[in-house]
Image: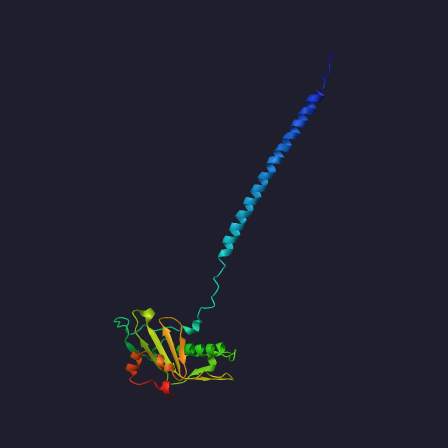
Amino acid sequence: MEVPARVNAVGDRSARSAGLAGVREYRSVLVPVAFVVAVLLGVAIGYVTADRQSGTVHAPRTATSPAPELTPALRTAPWEGARRPGTAHQMRVLDEPDPDALRLALSWTVADSIKAAGGASTISARQVTIVNGMYFGAVEGVDAAHDEYWAIGRIEVQGPATPPVDPHVWRRIGAGPWTIVRNGPRACDVLPSALITLWKVSPPPCTG
């Protein structure tokens, strides 16, 4: 006669308890591991995103950057092959790569000075005319970056803006921007003596 096996209830409960404990222990280990993986994944995505976006970031133009209109193209200086620093030269506007761009640069500086003085805020360089008879010269530097270009002239302004007092003296150093050095009755006092000696007289724009 076959005798049915007795069920070991205590052992069965012990096995289930051990299994549940193992599951809880496994979960307790899995949760922090998953958290660490999520953090690392987030950091990696952040780096990738930042790297992709970095290609579209452009350096902002600084407030001190000159307008490109103030730096028209220069021809190669005739004295480049045999420099004598301090030597003055008569220049011709028509010999420049773009004579109109040169005149526009000078007009631009006048328009800027009118705005800076609290004049017409809407005035543009196109409303400023450099009167014919402008003098244009240069003084050699130790290299092209130190060559000085000088212009002396008078202006006319269209519109309601009050024009600055003539004459105007402009200067450009190397490939830098044209700037107004001085304007008014004694503006020509700032001209290099080498240029005055070359011209033998004070340029007519200085005397009107």
Numbered marks: total: 0
Kindly tell me whether residue 143 is visible in this rendering: yes
**Compared with residue 182, is residue 66 higher up or lower down, i.e. above or below?**
above
Residue displayed at 53% across by 52% down: 49
42 vs 76, left or right, is right
The residue at the far bottom in this view is: 208
Residue found at the far top of this picture: 1
Q: Nearer the viewer, residue 189 or 199?
A: 189
What residue do we see at 47% from left, 76% from top?
Answer: 112
| Residue most extreme to the right | 1
Q: Residue at x 51, y 50 (%)?
A: 47
Tell me where residue 15 appears, x and y as whole percent. Answer: 66, 25
- Left or right of 73 on screen, residue 80: left
- Can residue 93 be seen at all in this image of the molecule? no
The residue lying at 48 percent from left, 79 percent from top is 114
Quadrant (top left, top right, bottom left, bottom right) of the C terminus: bottom left
Residue 11 in percent (x, y) is at: 68, 22
Q: In the figure, residue 156 lies in which quadrant? A: bottom left
Residue 79 rendering spot, x and y as whole percentages = 28, 73
> In the picture, residue 104 is in which quadrant?
bottom left
The image quadrant where one finds the N terminus is top right
In this image, 160 relative to 155: left or right?
A: right
Q: Nearer the viewer, residue 48 or 163?
A: 163
Tell me which colouring the rendered structure shows: rainbow
In this view, 172 is above or below 205: above
